Each structure stands twice: as structure tokens, then as C-alpha cells.
Amino acid sequence: PTISRHDYQPYPYRLPQVKLSFDLDPARTRVHAQLVFESASAGWQPLVLNGQDLELESVAIDGRPLRADEYVLQAETLTLHPRADRYTVDIVSVCKPEQNSSLMGLYVSGSQLFTQCEAEGFRRITWFPDRPDVMSQYQVVLRADKQKYPLLLSNGNLLEQRDLPDGRHEARWEDPHPKPCYLFAVVAGDFDCREEQARTQSGRPALLQVYSDRGSGGKTLWALECLRRSLEWDERRFGLELDLDRFMIVAARDFNMGAMENKGLNVFNSSYVLADKDTATDAAYRAIEAVIGHEYFHNWTGNRVTCRDWFQLSLKEGLTVFRDQEFSADMLAQGLSGAEAASARAVKRIDDVSTLRIAQFPEDAGPMAHPIRPESYQEIGNFYTATVYEKGAEVIRMQHTLLGEEGFRAGLEEYFRRHDGQAVTCDDFVDAMESVYVQKHPGKNLGVFRRWYAQAGTPRVAVDLRYDADAHACAVTLTQRCDPVGIEKLQDPPAEKPPLHIPFALGMLDRSGAALKPELDGTARDTVLLELREAQQTWTFRNVPERPVLSLLRNFSAPVIVEYERPDTELMLLAGHDTDPFARWEAGQELATRRLLALVGALRQGQDPAADTALVETWRRLLGDAALTPAYKARVLSLPAEKELLEKTSPMDPLGVVQARRQLRAQLGAALAPEWLSAYHSAQDAGDYSPDPLSAGLRSLKNLALSMLMAGAHPQAETLALEQYYGAGNMTARMGALSALVNHSKSPECAQALSHFYEQWQHDPLVMDKWFALQATAPGTTVETVRALMLHPAFSLRNPNRARSLIFQFCMNNLEGVHHADGYAFWAEQVIALDELNPEIAARLARAFDNWARFAEPQRSALRSALQSIQDREKLSRNVAEIISKALKI
Ligand code: ARG
Ligand code: ZN
């Protein structure tokens, strides 16, 4: 059952008014839906409604109950044959939240009730046209036991609340904004609430609220602050104001994803809401800020203008990720200017590009490769991917780069001018941007650029430099190609992949490291933006006094892989001097990558590679560079992630990567021990905890120094780590110390610290997730370790956070632990177990070995049989079936 983008048909009806009334009960919730339909096409069309796991009690048209032979009830549809242009349908149905472990639709979490409707969860609540291009105004009545569910929330404004007989009560909500059903939400239960009265730019009052489990209200201060800052930022940066009187965030313990932008009633995974200094790390504070921003920004990019169909998912997700990335970067750079601000923003850029490379590049090279606007799917839940989100954000960012800040903002304004209140496509977005682009670039358009929406795979751009000493000129040639990926590889003839429009930012340095200002078309600039639109193009620069050192793809101006051969010395020069902080970081990473890949090769041949000096010297200089901020320094001095390296080995060599990285860390730790030690001691963040970027930067550099000292087996390291652990005044310091210990030591003191951590935090679920994750990824952890942890009373497969912290962490991030036949068998077993409970989560885990065909024997065959063992199951969800069948096709 494959659904294709080209098969889109508009819905034959409009549904202006929806009235829903709920008798909430975890065992059986009765829903009465009253739907007013108006014909939107000629003739009387059958009315097809979606439904899943529902019991139908009655259905009526214009008040007349239908007999069983007047409708067709199938497994997932209810079909009626109305004979009017306008009519009202009344449907009464029952769903069973308690038995719903999928966490889609209406479900139970603890003693509370939540809904999750995106993408197709609303059909688990009532029969309905469950598609984003049907938009309606909602009136909702909620009834439930007052003691158990004192709080009854839905979208929009609370009109009335009153008590009913039998200890029940009722709340009436009305959302004035028409919306698709995926933005509908209900929450019921007992909560703490923290609130604040805010005022929008134009003076409109807005009540901001954060709800969380009883007793956790002390941990929502940061979330509320983030919400207020999101509000202000969207006004300031894009002129977008809140359109609601009341904006609510509710934290849920059981949640499939990060959070959900339901109109006026965001539901969040509690891990993106709750924070205090004792339980949340700096990284968690930053992640909360990003996700609160993300969901809030959806109110315009997603809710006011939504998607016509789910192939357009990146329309809202790519754009909103871009917006949350910019929000986070602006928060890091707040109060700074010039080079300091640039370096602060670069920290965010570095983190985002690392995520892209770790999660999206492999996806774009594997069996699930798809364009940011997919052409087809079997299960839309499988397409909430790094490609749609993160690469989608890069595609928006490139438009921002091509248009400039002002142009982009004008394009966005045009987009809202044209489409406010509509359900539209990615093309509609690019059209709006293009209307601005053509004004600035007469005779050009975004025609070639649009191919980014249609093409999968990570393009490669090869760089060639010719220097003419006599003319003081140099020619830079860029050549792009994008190899077939995923199922494209099986196509004969191979799929055509025409060139893309690639904004390529370039700078030049001289041999002393000073910036050159090359001249192109008569203008001299530090950074030039080359717009590559053809397979190959050459640009000639004047006024270049010597053969330049190229600084390539500055600020990662496009999601591509650059190919350029150059000596280590050039990378060392760039790592020491590039004025673009992103490219400077990149040069150091490239140098480290070369070293690590050489190590992997040497290990494979059983050789002992010569000790490195180039990298050690580069690291030494960077460590001692007083001009670098601690946060930036911590990024610059970290080695590329295992998964990034794995992508670059062929055949894939997970154990080689782990060993090489471990060896190089040991070497850098030992060779630079005095420097790490002094960095450790000087990075003191005095005073009370605050998650601000400056003190967080100090803590991250300090934790890096500690782990490098541990890696280098410094005689004082373990003592320092234990002191830091037991003396820690915040979770960042505590976790930094504990993970340095767990990852490098087998001493009884280390084991003691781990159980001390358990004793102290066993009542805090989010901290227990960290405790599980730490052990899942520790060196030496095996399938047996994980099985033992699964027997721990605190473990549960039903809670996605817990499953992620132990099983996903082990299967996806413990390369050494999982890459054996028994690791693969364990993985397959867990995919199957999870699939019974929660298909969406199971399908995520099912993707752990997308890249199986790129491994050497015996792993390759062992992985294939593990995949096969899942495929052979009789009852697989559509989610898991799609993933596994695609993986096995490769
Ligand atoms: N729209 C949400 C976000 O980006 C993601 C929700 C997806 N949920 C799901 N169960 N597939 O924040
Ligand atoms: Zn989103």
C-alpha cells in the first residue's frame, strides 16, 4: 500500500464546523462528533472517513440514525452516501485509552490522559477526514471525574466550566482558528501550573502556562522563560505575533517524539520541559529552549499556514527547524557583537552540522534515502526524519543565504500574505521566496534551486584551484555530482540527477594565515558567495598576491560534501587562523579525521602507526589560544563522532573506529596533560549555577579536559573526577564527572559513584534515563549487561524515554557492544517486542542498521539474517514492515 505524491486529490467536502464531546474514561471514552459537511465538488460524492481501533455506536445524517445497510464500515474507513450539498453527520464511538500503548490518539500516561494526533492519530479518536487539508473550527466539551481529572484542557479558549452530578465536571472549549485535525489536542488530569501574563507587541494580553506532573512545578521556570523569549524573538526577528489569548504547554512522561505544536495547547515530552540545576545538564537546558522555540514557532509556520498533504511535511518542519536554530543562535549571541557574536553563533552551527552529518548523511546514503519532499511512503510516521527536518532546514537556510536576511524576511511576509489560513505546498513557499529573489537577481530564478526538494542523496562538490603567479589571479572550479542512493541504485537506467543550485561560500588566506580579499567582478570581499548552478563552473579572482589557502564552504553554506586535496599544513593553518569560525573548526576536524582514518587502516593491518605530531601541535595551540571562548574551544578540541567516522570507512569498520578514536584520545590526553590540567583548573565557573552560554561553555571545556585526562590515564584524573562528582553543585558537573569515570575506569570507586548516583536520583525519571544511558553506552557493556538492566524494576519498554535510554542507546550508540551476532539478535528481538506495543518507536529502532550492506563479513550476513528474522514475523506493523522491506531490498 504505497501512497504517491502525484496521486493527491482534493477532498470533495469542506468541513467548516466540528463539535466534539468527550466522556473521558481511561477504560472506555465515548466521543460524540457532530460534523457539518459542505460539498466542494460537483455531484454527490461518497463521504469516506478514517477510523482506527474504534467501536461505532451510532451514525446519523441530519438527525436521522442510519441503518447498518446505509453505511459501509471497513477496518479503517467508514463510508456514507449523503444526498445533499450540506448536511450534518453525528457519530458516537468509543475508544480505549488504557489499551492504547501506541501513544497515538487518546492515551493514558500515569494518571493523566493525553492526545497525539500528528500525523494520523485523530482517526483513533473519531471517524473523520484525517488529512491536513480539511480545516475546521472546533468546539469541544470535555466531561470527566472531577477528582481524578481536575483539569480539562483543549485548544483555544475556555468558555465555561461546571460541575455535574456523580462527582463529574465539564469544560467547554472553543478554538476560533480553523485547523486541521492533526493540531487538535485534549489533556486531562491533575497538574502543577506555572503561569505568566504576557503582552504581545501590539499590546494584546496573553496568558502563558506550563503544566507538569504534581510536584514537578519547581522545574518549569526555565520552560516558561523560554516560552516568553520565543514570543519576543518571533516578533523581533520576523514580525510574527501570537494570535491567542492563552498559550499552554503540558509535559507528558510518555511521549513518542520531542513535542507537538497543537494549536494553543502544546504537548511536550517531559524531557523538553523539566529542568533545574540538580537534575538537568546545560545541554538539556539548551534542548528545552530549542524545542519550546520550535513548537512555538510552528504557530505561524505550520498552524496558520499548514501542509496540503503529508508529502509537504518539510514545508513546516524544515522551516520551523531553521527558525528554532536561528532562535538558539541568537540566544547564544545575545549581548555580543562582531567576532564574539560570530563565534557564539558558530557553536550552534557546529552542533547542528554535526547532527546533520551523524543522522542525515547516513540516511541519505541508505535504503530510506528520500528527498526532503518524499515521492511516496507506506507509513507517514516513518517520514519524520532527519532528512525532512534537518536537511529541510538546510534547504531553507540556503534560501536565506541566497536572499539575505532582509530578502528572506520579505519572502516570508509574502508567503503569509498569500497563504495565511491555507494548507499549501513546498512549491508555494519557494514561489513566495522567488518573488523576492527575482527582484534582486534580474533574469534569474529559483528553478534550479527547487531540485533540492526533489532529489535525494548528499551532493559532492569537488574543488580545483589554478593559480597564475604572473597575473595575480586564480581560478576556482567547482564540480558537483550526486551519486544514486537507496533504491535509485537498483534503477536501470539510473535515475537522472541534474545539477543543483548550490550557494558556496569561499574565503582565502595567505601563507601566514592573514585573510586575503580576492576580487571577483570588480568587488573585493572577505567571503564570496559562489552560486553553482551547473555541473561545473569556474570563477576567476583578481588581486591574489600569492597562491591562496582556500577556506571552503564557510558556515556550511550548503548540505554537501566538499572534496579538495590539500596537505595537512593547509588544514593546520586554517585551524589556527581562519576568520570564519565554522570553517576553522572544520579544518581541525578534517585534520583529526585524516589521522583517525589512518589509524583505522593501520589497526586493520595490525600495524602500530607512528605517533602523531601535527595534530598534537594543532591541539596544543588551540588549547592555549586565549582568544577562543571556552564553548567554542570545547567544540574545536573534540574529535569527530564515531558515527561520522564510520560513514567514511569502507567497508564499515565499527570496531576499528572505536579503537582508533580511543587511541587518539589517549594520545592527545597524555601528550597534552599539562595543558588539559591547566584548562581544567582555569575553567572554574564560580558562584551559583546559571545555564547562560558563558558558564555553560566553561563547564563543557572543563568536562572535556577531565575526560581527556582520564583518557590519557593521568595519575590525578580519577581523583579529580571523584572530587568533581561528589562535590558537584549541578547536574552538568555531576554527569561530566560520572561519565568520565564510567567511560574510562573500572575501579571500585567508579562503580560506587554509579550506585551513589542511583541511590540519590532513583525517584527522578529523567535522571534515571541518564543512569540507564550511561551504562548502555559504556565500554564493556554487552547484551548481557543490557538484559540485566532490563530486569531492573525501573525499566519499562512502554515508556519511550526509558526504551530509548537503554535499548536505543545500546543498539545505536554502543558500536563495540552491538556489532556482534548476539547484538544483532538482541536488536531484532527488541524491535519485535516494541512493535507489539508501539509501532512508531519500533520503527525507529528498526532503522539502527540501515547501513548493513556496507559492512564486511561476517557482520554483513549476520545483519541480514537479523533483518530477515524480523521480516519473517507474521504480524508486523506497517511502520516496521516498510523499514525492514526497504532495508532488505538494498
Ligand atoms: N510536529 C511535531 C514537531 O515537529 C512532531 C510530531 C510528530 N509526531 C509523531 N508521532 N509522528 O514538533
Ligand atoms: Zn516540528
Image (spheres, rainbow, N blue to C red):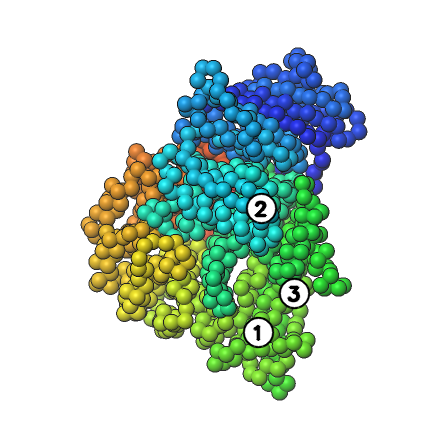
Q: Is residue 756 visible?
A: yes
Quarter holding the N terminus is top right
Dot placed on the residue nearer the N-terminal end, 1 or 3:
1
Q: Alpha carbon of mark 3 to alpha carbon of mark 2: how far?
A: 46 Å
Q: What amino acid type is highlighted by mark number 1?
A: Asp
Please tell me whether mark 1 or mark 3 is closer to you in this view.
1
Q: What amino acid type is highlighted by mark number 2?
A: Gly
**Residue 142, placed above or below residue 385:** above
Question: How far from the left and from the top, in percent, is residue 253?
Answer: 41, 36
**Residue 635, placed above or below residue 215:** below
Please tell me whether mark 3 or mark 2 is closer to you in this view.
2
Q: Residue furthest left?
A: 748
Q: Residue furthest right?
A: 42
Mark 2 surroundings within 10 Å by alpha-carbon count, few (fewer than 14), some (14 through 19), many (20 or more): few
Q: What amino acid type is highlighted by mark number 3?
A: Leu
Please tell me whether mark 1 or mark 2 is closer to you in this view.
2
> Is 597 on the left-hand or right-hand side of 5?
left
Dot placed on the residue nearer the N-terminal end, 3 or 2:
2
Q: Alpha carbon of mark 1 to alpha carbon of mark 2: how far?
A: 43 Å
Please name the residue that numbered disc 1 is placed on.
Answer: 526
**Residue at the spot x=44%, y=58% of the render?**
645
Judged from the image, the secondary structure of the residue bearing numbered disc 1 is loop
Circles 3 and 2: CB distance less than 8 Å?
no
Mark 3 surroundings within 10 Å by alpha-carbon count, few (fewer than 14), some (14 through 19), many (20 or more): many
Q: Residue furthest front?
A: 203
> Is 227 on the left-hand or right-hand side of 779?
right
Please name the residue that numbered disc 2 is placed on.
Answer: 203
Q: Alpha carbon of mark 1 to alpha carbon of mark 3: how far?
A: 19 Å
**Residue at the spot x=51%, y=40% of the render?**
207
Please name the residue that numbered disc 3 is placed on.
Answer: 532
> Is 111 on the left-hand or right-hand side of 539?
left
